[in-house]
Amino acid sequence: MRTIWKYPIGYEGEHTISIPRCLGDENEIMKFKNQVLFVGNQNEIPTIWAVVDDTAVKRDVPVLVYGTGFNCNDAALNKYLGSVTTHNGNFVWHLFVK
């Protein structure tokens, strides 16, 4: 069954989330980036909300987090997920799929 799950990510560095796959409308396996509905701040923690099939096999997805002004040479710009502000807008975090 399709449901929406949230994944608290954390701050700078590489984080791995274990997320079930999801079939799209044409019964094809969706790419992780297409499963992502929203990237936002929840309780000062960068968080991803994604649609999943809760009966499907999980896969590990590495997510890279960079702060504004930090080195982001490892980021694939075409795999950008979104940005999030924390601490009253004093920090901006940018999330990418590795």
Image: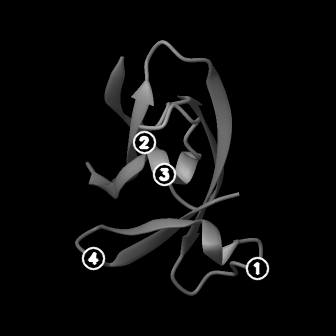
Q: Quadrant of residue 20?
A: top right
Disc 4, SS: loop
Amino acid carrying label 3: it is Asn
Q: Mark 3 sits on what residue?
A: 34
Report the residue at 54% width, 17% height from top: 56
In the image, is 94 to the left or to the right of 43? right
**Label 1, label 3: how many angstroms apart (C-alpha)?**
23 Å
Q: Nearer the viewer, mark 4 or mark 3?
A: 3
Report the residue at 50% width, 31% height from top: 23
Q: Mark 4 sits on what residue?
A: 89
First in sequence: mark 3 vs mark 2: 2
Front residue of 53 and 18: 53
Q: Position of residue 91 (x, y in %)?
A: 39, 75
Q: Could you tell me if the residues under marks 3 and 2 are in contact, i.e. CB atoms within 8 Å?
A: no
Q: Mark 2 sits on what residue?
A: 8
In the image, is 43 to the left or to the right of 62? left
Amino acid carrying label 4: it is Gly
Q: Nearer the viewer, mark 3 or mark 2?
A: 3
Disc 1, SS: loop
Q: Could you tell me if the residues under marks 1 and 4 are in contact, i.e. CB atoms within 8 Å?
A: no
Q: Mark 1 sits on what residue?
A: 73
First in sequence: mark 4 vs mark 3: 3
Q: Residues within 10 Å of mark 1 (few under 14, many from 20)?
A: few
**Label 1, label 4: how many angstroms apart (C-alpha)?**
24 Å
Q: Could you tell me if the residues under marks 1 and 2 are in contact, i.e. CB atoms within 8 Å?
A: no
First in sequence: mark 1 vs mark 4: 1
Q: Position of residue 16 (x, y in %)?
A: 64, 41
Q: Position of residue 14 (x, y in %)?
A: 68, 53
Front residue of 43 and 34: 34
Q: Quadrant of residue 18?
A: top right
- Considering every residue shown, the one lying at the far right of the view is 74
